[in-house]
Image (tube, rainbow, N blue to C red):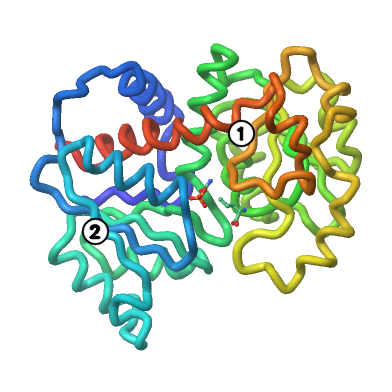
Amino acid sequence: MKRDFLRLWDLSADEIDELIERAIGLKRGEDAQKCPLIGRSIGLLFEKPSTRTRISFEVGIYQLGAQAVYMTPSEIQLGRGETIEDTARILSRYLHAVVIRTFGHDRLVRFSSASDIPVINGLSDSHHPCQALADLMTIKEKKGRIKGIKVAYIGDGNNVANSLVEAAGRMGFSLNIACPEGYEPDADVLEDARDAGGEIIILRDPREAAGRADVIYTDVWVSMGQEAEMEQKKQRFRPYQVNAQLLGCARSDVIVMHCLPAHRDEEITSEVIDGPSSVVFEQAENRLHAQKALLEMILSH
Ligand code: CP
Ligand code: NVA
């Protein structure tokens, strides 16, 4: 039975704990000489640009002994109208798993239904679960625990926010989200996470959300594919900038996270992203370790 990772929900809390421990071990150099995925080929089908996701997967796949095959729609027949389902059927016959970065989440679901190989979501318009794994690993490293931590997400209720909401539902940290009205995470994602026991509060005032936070998290206001809304969103989100003044509302040992890439001096000031509270570059490094642990979990048997 193939094992997909399309949303954070696809892993149990125990599996996420195990994966984080393994990722921390891999980061320390554990099993560096072992190549558990030797002889496998893993596709990377990317319909949007990427620095972290693409390179961390390519390098991680190599370190696990497997081969990465990078594809964009314009280089394969998908870009000339071959269906997602036919593409999935064909790639299933060559590859052992595929990481897909795309627009509508339904494209991942369609690919998965027609494929015999595990599908990993490398970002869709609605979810970014690989990012959430690295985020959880970073929180565990920096704060020593995940359960009971207070996270403030300041900004757009986008794919990154949806995956953090699912993470809060799964892992038992509290999540205060500050966003303008109409820019909340998806209602069904919020409902499922709250049903699972997640303590998730939507606020309008970023200072209130940041109050006593252990972690302040933000992301761009305009995600890939939303460029037409840029000017309107920039106006609407201006009060939601993560800056030194906002940090003053949080605990003195607060850490600042951002999935990157950042639009410096829009959603976060350079002073904060380059400042002592920021863990963004280690968070980005953790993509590599967390995804290696994910690939091992999904593919090693
Ligand atoms: N955070 C993240 O997914 O970055 P990339 O878009 O560079 O992959
Ligand atoms: N929300 C951003 C995340 C980029 C990693 C986007 O979708 O563009």
Q: Position of residue 238 (x, y in %)?
A: 88, 50
- Which of the 4 image quadrants contains residue 288? top left
Q: Are marks 1 and 2 in contact (CB under 8 Å)?
A: no
Q: Position of residue 110 (x, y in %)?
A: 38, 70
Q: Disc 1 marks which amino acid?
A: Ala
* Relative height, residue 221 to residue 134 (above, below): below
User: Where residue 300 is drawn, which disc sits there?
Assistant: none
- Which of the 4 image quadrants contains residue 101? bottom left
Identify which residue, 290 or 299, lies in the foreground.
Answer: 290
Circle 2 Cα neighbour tier, 10 Å, few/some/many (<14 / 14–19 / ≥20):
some
Q: Residue at x 85, y 52 (%)?
A: 237
Q: What is the C-alpha distance between the residues marked 1 and 2? A: 33 Å
* Relative height, residue 115 to residue 147 (above, below): below
Q: Position of residue 169 (x, y in %)?
A: 59, 35
- The answer to whether residue 75 of the structure is visible from this angle is yes
Q: Residue at x 31, y 85 (%)?
A: 82
Q: Disc 2 marks which amino acid?
A: Val
Q: Position of residue 68 (x, y in %)?
A: 23, 52
Q: Which residue is mark 1?
A: 168
* Relative height, residue 215 to residue 179 (above, below): above
Which comes sooner in the sequence, label 1 or label 2?
Answer: 2
Identify which residue, 192 or 144, lies in the foreground.
Answer: 144
Mark 2 lies on a secondary structure that is: strand
Q: Residue at x 83, y 42 (%)?
A: 241
Q: Is 246 on the left-hand or right-hand side of 50?
A: right
Which of label 1 and label 2 is nearer to you? 2
Q: Which residue is mark 2?
A: 69
Q: Residue at x 42, y 54 (%)?
A: 121
Q: How many marks?
A: 2
* Relative height, residue 212 to residue 67 (above, below): above
Badge 2 residue CB within 8 Å of ligand 1: no
